[in-house]
Image (cartoon, coloured by chain):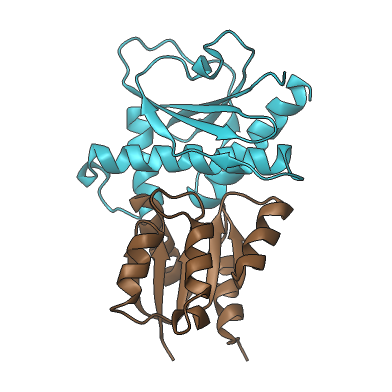
Chain colours: A brown, B cyan
């Protein structure tokens, strides 16, 4: 089964790298959508379904915390698993994002295997 | 926290980011060679936390273009726009800053404001207001990068 992924990050370079890392990691990727902040992601999700979302925290307009909070309040979209991809590796931030409803957390820098592993974990799939 | 420990954290964080995400091989550098007229890119990331401060990064423009191509997986580095190269340099500063702060402030949260490119000069401009800044130079295969960190004085 191939998956549709949404990457939310205000850095075009980071979005590009995450997309490339997902591809080279061997993750079964069907489509990769992008948004530059939470509000843009919310607008996109009204038109397109995705299986999993990767989001940064520090973004303009709507940051990662606000985005996760809004998403989890939505009856339909709230079921989409969210993995936070951030430079912030502090326990306080990780606990905060998980308490808001994020399903996973990957800290930058990361190896492709780490991102793939977290994606597969939150999607409930694994290698036999 | 002493400057020696800050300096060690700075070097460790920069090395981890460059090796993991930029596929760079590094050696410790000593001094920034005097190359008048060599174009450079400088990125500055301000952060708020406990403590707050600034991280600056300086890199020769040609080195920045090479690592941007490696980061983005571009086959031809000359095909990258200046904006793409600048975005990658800012993202490098962002990741190093986050890695440093996660080591410095592992009990409390912090916020990194979007890094910005600043006009050339020494990356030691992290200490431009007169407060002390620690800096490290790392040698890459085709150039070097300098990172500097200034922590605000807690009043």
Can residue B25 be seen in the rendering of this structure? no
A12 or A22, which lies in front? Answer: A12
Q: In the displayed structure, would residue A46 be above or below residue B77?
A: below
Point out residue A81 in the picture as x, y percentages from the top left corner: 53, 77
B149 or A10, which lies in front? Answer: A10
**Number of numbered labels in the structure image:** 0
Point out residue B9 in the picture as x, y percentages from the top left corner: 70, 34
A1 or B70, which lies in front? Answer: A1
* Residue B55: quarter of image: top right
* Residue A121: quarter of image: bottom right
Q: In the displayed structure, would residue A128 be above or below residue B131?
A: below
Can residue B152 be seen in the rendering of this structure? yes
Point out residue B17 in the picture as x, y percentages from the top left corner: 56, 45
Tell me what residue is drawn at x 30 percent, y 53 percent. B74
Q: In the displayed structure, would residue A110 be above or below residue B120?
A: below
Point out residue A31 in the picture as x, y percentages from the top left corner: 33, 78
Tell me what residue is drawn at x 59 percent, y 62 percent. A106
Tell me what residue is drawn at x 40 percent, y 37 percent. B89
Please give left or right for residue A102 compared with residue A64 in the image.
right
Give the quarter of the figure containing the C terminus of chain B: top right
* Residue A101: quarter of image: bottom right
Tell me what residue is drawn at x 59 percent, y 34 percent. B48
Give the quarter of the figure containing the N terminus of chain B: top right
Please give left or right for residue B20 compared with residue B1 in the image.
left
């Amino acid at each position: 089964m191939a998956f549709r992924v949404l990457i939310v990050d205000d850095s075009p370079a980071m979005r590009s790298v995450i997309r490339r890392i997902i591809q080279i990691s061997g993750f079964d990727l069907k489509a990769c959508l992008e948004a530059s902040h939470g509000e843009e992601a919310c607008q996109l999700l009204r038109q397109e379904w995705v299986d999993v979302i990767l989001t940064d925290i520090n973004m303009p307009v709507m940051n990662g915390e606000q985005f996760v909070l809004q998403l989890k309040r939505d009856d339909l979209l709230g079921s989409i698993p969210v993995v936070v991809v951030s430079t912030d590796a502090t326990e306080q931030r990780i606990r905060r994002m998980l308490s808001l409803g994020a399903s996973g957390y990957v800290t930058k820098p990361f190896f492709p295997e780490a991102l793939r592993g977290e994606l597969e974990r939150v999607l409930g799939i694994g290698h036999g | 926290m002493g400057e020696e420990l800050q300096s060690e954290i700075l070097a460790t964080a920069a090395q981890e980011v460059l090796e993991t995400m930029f596929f760079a091989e590094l050696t410790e550098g000593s001094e920034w060679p005097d190359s008048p007229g060599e174009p450079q890119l400088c990125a500055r990331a301000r952060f708020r936390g406990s403590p707050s401060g600034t991280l600056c990064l300086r890199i020769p423009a040609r080195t920045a273009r090479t690592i941007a191509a490696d980061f983005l997986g571009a086959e031809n580095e000359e095909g990258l726009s200046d904006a793409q190269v600048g975005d990658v340099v800012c993202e490098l500063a962002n990741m190093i800053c986050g890695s440093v702060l996660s080591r410095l402030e592992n009990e409390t949260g912090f916020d990194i404001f979007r890094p910005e490119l600043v006009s050339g000069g020494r990356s030691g401009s992290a200490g431009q207001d007169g407060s002390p800044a620690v800096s490290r130079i790392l040698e890459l295969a085709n150039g070097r990068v300098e990172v500097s960190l200034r922590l605000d004085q807690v009043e």
